[in-house]
């Protein structure tokens, strides 16, 4: 069996690759395919990586956000434990078949979420002593070079004993920090391409598919939905779905939010009407409509789902409306993602979305 490699480039929209020198990905596209696919909404890391490793939508696997509010327990938690998963991962499926799978992530929170069943699971944030002894300590998680270290770690496994499946998923610090045309972005993408080329050449029989979990855009308008609703006398808890422990990346400001109302029966219509009038808000929909339209798990989203326009982000701010300067994601405007691949899957059925990636390569 060939070693199957899935690479997820965190926060890498098609523009980052199109503007860069990527000879190895160019070669992959000639031997296989390249296309622009769509990420799963909301366009955040946890949702899309879980979609890839379970080959299913959030309505099935249950991961709807980076940060979760439990309306029953009235508790807010980071959604980063495999206990939240409702569907078997590809790693677990391969284990049942007696096959070996390896997972490399940049962030430890993603490793703990999707690692179930993996024969080996490592993160650049908290690597094992064995891995550090083999390739050296990783750079800081808030650097461009941490992703390059991650690919070198994956390469060391391929050269030592190729597994049946290798899944590598990076961090989006670089795309949160630099635009596609920036010199550092161009250098990073070229280096990533070089390392992917080394991975392809590391074993005689490799099949590859590369995707991204979401794109990235500059944002200039910030809205604090809690303050906006409170100003109208509506008590609610608006959860920015991008929120995680890595606030340097995005300051917990993202393009989508779940709104949990204290009294939904009395305030739902008024709250939606108020939010629809707010500049910077592109879509407002009740729970059932959002779950149906975006294949979300209805018990793990709020009473209202809110999507920002291309220039706007939601989060906790000093005032209800503020000018901001941040590169972020979460909205419909970060759905476009690059998908490259070559392997056994027919070109007529090439994946167009992250829920199809794993099924295609297998």
Image (cartoon, rainbow, N blue to C red):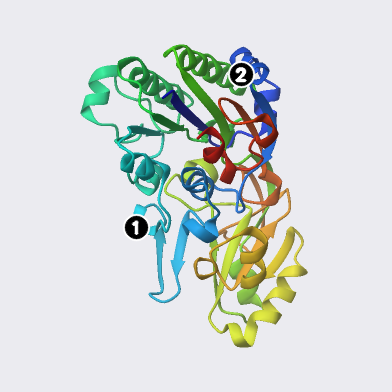
Image point (40%, 39%), residue name: 107
- Mark 1, other Cα within 10 Å: few <14 / some 14–19 / many ≥20: few
Q: Position of residue 315 (x, y in %)?
A: 57, 58
Disc 2 to disc 1, C-alpha distance: 36 Å
- Residue 360 x %, y %: 57, 36
Outermost residue toward the bottom?
266
Quickly name the residue at label 1.
83
Mark 2 surroundings within 10 Å by alpha-carbon count, few (fewer than 14), some (14 through 19), many (20 or more)? some
**Mark 1 falls on what kind of element?**
helix
Displayed quadrant of residue 30: top right
Residue 190 position, x and y percent, is 58, 16
Residue at 53 percent of width and 81 percent of height: 262
Percent across and percent down for residue 287 are: 61, 71
**Mark toward the viewer: 2 or 1:** 2
> Where 265 sits versus 75, above or below?
below
Compared to 53, does 77 lie above or below? below
Q: Viewed as shown, does residue 313 lie left or right of 114? A: right
Tell me the element at label 2: helix
User: Could you tell me if residue 63 is visible in this image?
Assistant: no
Which residue does the image show at 32% across and 40% down from the upper left? 95
Whichever of labels 2 and 1 marks the residue nearer the N terminus, that label is: 2
| Residue labelled with disc 2 | 28
Query: In the picture shown, does residue 337 fall above or below 260?
Result: above
> For this rendering, which residue is in front, 72 or 164?
164
């Amino acid at each position: 069996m060939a070693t199957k490699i899935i690479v997820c480039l965190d926060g890498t929209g098609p523009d980052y690759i199109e503007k860069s020198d990527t000879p190895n990905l160019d070669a992959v596209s000639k031997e296989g395919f390249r296309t622009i696919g769509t990420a799963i909404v909301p366009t955040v890391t946890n949702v899309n990586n879980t979609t890839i490793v379970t080959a299913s939508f959030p309505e099935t696997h249950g991961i709807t956000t980076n940060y979760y509010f439990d309306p029953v327990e009235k508790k807010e938690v980071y959604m980063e434990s495999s206990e939240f998963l409702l569907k078997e991962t590809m790693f677990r499926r391969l284990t049942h078949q007696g096959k070996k799978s390896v997972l490399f992530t940049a962030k430890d929170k993603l490793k703990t979420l999707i690692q179930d069943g993996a024969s080996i699971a490592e993160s650049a944030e908290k690597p094992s002593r064995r891995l550090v002894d083999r390739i050296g300590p990783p750079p800081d998680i808030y650097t461009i070079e941490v992703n390059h270290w991650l690919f070198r770690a994956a390469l060391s496994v391929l050269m030592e004993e190729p597994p049946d499946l290798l899944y590598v998923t990076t961090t989006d610090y670089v795309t949160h920090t630099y635009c596609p045309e920036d010199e550092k972005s161009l250098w990073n993408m070229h280096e990533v391409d070089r390392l992917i080329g080394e991975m392809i050449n590391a074993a005689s029989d490799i099949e590859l598919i590369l995707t991204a979990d979401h794109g990235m855009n500059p944002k200039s308008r910030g809205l604090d939905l809690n303050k906006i609703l409170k100003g109208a006398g509506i008590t609610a808890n608006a959860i920015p779905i991008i929120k995680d422990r890595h606030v340097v990346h995005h300051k917990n400001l993202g393009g989508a939010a779940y709104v949990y109302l204290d009294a939904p029966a009395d305030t739902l219509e008024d709250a939606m009407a108020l939010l629809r009038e707010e500049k910077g808000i592109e879509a407002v929909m009740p729970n059932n409509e959002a779950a149906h339209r975006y294949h979300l798990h209805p018990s793990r989203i709020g009473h209202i789902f809110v999507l920002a326009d291309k220039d706007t982000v939601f989060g906790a701010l000093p005032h209800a409306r503020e000018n901001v300067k941040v590169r972020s994601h979460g909205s419909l405007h970060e759905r476009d993602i690059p998908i490259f691949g070559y392997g056994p899957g027919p070109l007529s059925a090439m994946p167009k979305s992250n829920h199809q990636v794993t099924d295609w390569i297998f």
